[in-house]
Amino acid sequence: MKPVRVAIAGAGGRMGRMLVEAAQEDPGIELVAALERPGSEWIGRDAGEQLGRSTGVVIDDDYERAIGAADCLIDFTRPAVSVGLVRTAQRLGKSMVIGTTGFDAEQRAIIEQAATEIPIVLAPNMAIGVNVVFRLLEGAAALLGEGYDVEVIEAHHRNKVDAPSGTALEMGRTIARVLGFDLDREAVYGRQGTVGVRPSRQIGFSSIRGGDIVGDHTVLFAGTGERIEITHRAQSRMPYAVGAMRAARFLQGRAPGLYDMRDVLGLR
């Protein structure tokens, strides 16, 4: 099978650099285009410059041209940017891998509509280890039931703009599905003041922002006389990039639809 031709959005950023490196090292992927916002200092420079290598791909701000050259667009940018990219990919009939988080309901609806015409992998976390953790959480929630209080604690670098992280929210959603909770009604995001006795049907979220933390997530199941903690710590952004390449290969020849990493990894 021919390599999947990919375009990478936000190629001048830290995650973009990891995506470029992962694309170069994956024999099933061919990097054919790289995008940045108009006015970026990276426009016109080689996509591999930050890595100290030449890719032969120049970073472009013409989204139509860049996406049109690819089979699949990989996007880890910001929600407003992602929505514009989704519309372009839909118009051009290209598949898309979206690792951006922080979408509101309206933006999510735009992605879901586009997925009726093009195949999209949308996942809050592309790392294979994190998606294994989701499976572990399903099993733990099923076995422990409502006798254990659930708290999700996440930590990220100072520049992350959304909280809780998309991964933390997906961890909460995973547990809520198993326990039959309505997460929208029974989640609590941080606590302050006299909050009263903790309800049993509640999932708490706490967010830490500081330094250059790549991404730590811990789910705490607190029972009487014992605690169980399931933790994933990302030491670099490369696991997300490797997972994104796997998702791009998964989409090759796939029917339109909205997929996630559990589909990619066969964990359904």
Image: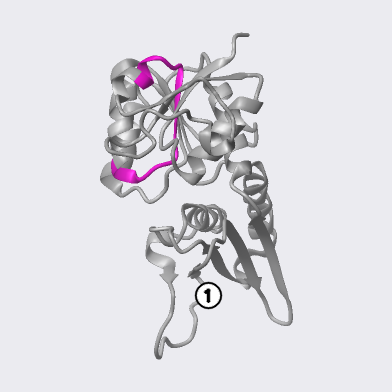
Residue 263 visible, this orientation: no
- Percent coordinates x, y for residue 147 in the rendering: 63, 72
- Percent coordinates x, y for residue 3 in the rendering: 59, 14
Residue 159 sits above or below residue 24 on the image: below
Residue 86 lies left or right of residue 264; in this view the side is left
- Percent coordinates x, y for residue 143 in the rendering: 70, 59
Write the residue at 35% across / 39% down.
41
- Number of disc labels: 1
Residue marked by disc 1: 200
Write the residue at 31% across / 29% down.
61
Residue 97 visible, this orientation: yes
Which scheme is used to colour this image of the protein?
Answer: one colour
Start-end of magenta stretch = 66-80
Q: Residue furthest top?
A: 1
Quadrant of image for the N terminus: top right
Residue 38 lies left or right of residue 226; in this view the side is left
Quadrant of image for the C terminus: top right
- Percent coordinates x, y for residue 214 in the rendering: 57, 56
- In the rendered structure, does residue 210 fall within the stretch colored magenta? no
